[in-house]
Image: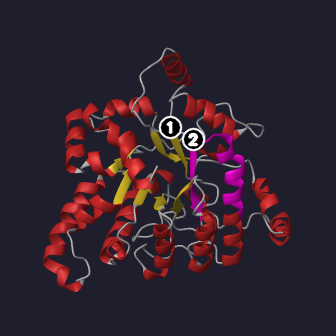
Amino acid sequence: MSAVDTERRTSDKDLGSPKIAPYLVDCDLHHLWHQIDDIFPYLPRQYVQEIKDFGPMFPGGMWTNMPNNHGYRIDQDVDHETNFPSFTVTEHMDRYDFDVGILTGGDIYLITATTNLDYAAAICRAYNDWTLDHWVAEDDRFRMVLAIGPNDPIQAVEEIDRLGGHPAVVGVNLPAGGRHPYGNRMYHPIYEAAERHGLAMVTHFGGEGVGANNAPTAAGYPTYYLEMRMARPQIAQAHVASLICEGVFEKYKDLKWVFVEVDTWWIPGLLDHFDADWKALRDYTPWVKQLPSEYFRKHIRVGTQPLEQPAKREDLHRFFDQANAREVLVYASDFPHWDWDEPVATAATFPESIRDEIFGSNARQAFKL
């Protein structure tokens, strides 16, 4: 979006443009540090010194040639002096009159791929405390998902138990890149803890093919950033199939799962195929007692961003029906990234009859807002 567009949106808001939904929620609001030094006050001295000696020691994830400047839009004036929390409140939360913005992180997705599990756990603890002190304290509309190191479920559960009762904590983040598909029972203690605290699981694109994580596609590693973006839906589908086939939602009947920034067009195709094959093959997974589409409808929500833009608007509305968008989609802006979905323009894409659910009530139900 251009600076002219941004100025026009601001003018529209100043003139009192109507609120998009009675209760407006953004399910993907990235909160970023300037540099890792920002969390030093929350880290044990051992790791502060190691970072000073060797650098952050995160697995390298820039092989996909992602944009610089934290992915911020170039029309926004941000630099090393910018107060990111205040900037986000002014440019996003206030401008569009959001009731809740869910902070999904971004700086430390790659830490989930490190083999140094104690370091990963310490970084996540520090990041969570820093988020509470520097972001949540900035505005009472902010909520957050906890960063954890999923490869050490014991320490992950300890972190969920430490902060899961905080009123601003609404979820637990498992980036899409992992050692296993997320139905694997290695992760089940994490889900038990999340359910016990009434927290949703959140899977955001990131960390695929990095460090100890598996390759981002079954065919191997993409070469280009554009190519990597096209891989997102298959990664999400693999996790969804695993969660259902491994019986996660039979075991944790109150668990909700929100997938963010993984596209949406794959939903009807996967579920139609999944239901048909389950009918023929369900003897092999007798613990899967319902149609896969039923588990999906009850437990899984998917962020709208990046929203498909077919040439014909009627094709998009047909997709909304096929995907059961009224129930399963939640608005996610991806602010402040260059490819974010501005809320007013995104709302205009949806029929008025389903906007309240997608822009508010579905998220309220998933995150217990």
Query: x and y percent of residue 369 in the render?
Result: 46, 49
Asked whether the residues under the numbered discs 1 and 2 touch, taking CB atoms below 8 Å apart as contact, a structural biologist would say yes
Q: Callout 2: helix, strand or loop? A: loop
The image quadrant of residue 48 is: bottom right
Disc 1 residue type? Answer: Asp
User: What segment is highlighted magenta in the picture?
Assistant: 126-147
The image quadrant of residue 46 is: bottom right
Dot 2: few (<14), some (14–19), or many (≥20) neighbours within 10 Å? some
Q: Callout 1: helix, strand or loop? A: loop
As rendered, which of 28 and 190 lies closer to the eye?
A: 190
- In the picture of the structure, the residue carrying the numbered disc 2 is 141
Q: Is residue 25 visible?
A: yes
Give me the residue at 20% from left, 68% from top: 291
In the picture, the disc for residue 99 is 1
Q: Is residue 211 visible?
A: no
Q: Is residue 129 magenta?
A: yes
The image quadrant of residue 78 is: top right
As rendered, which of 195 and 36 lies closer to the eye?
A: 195
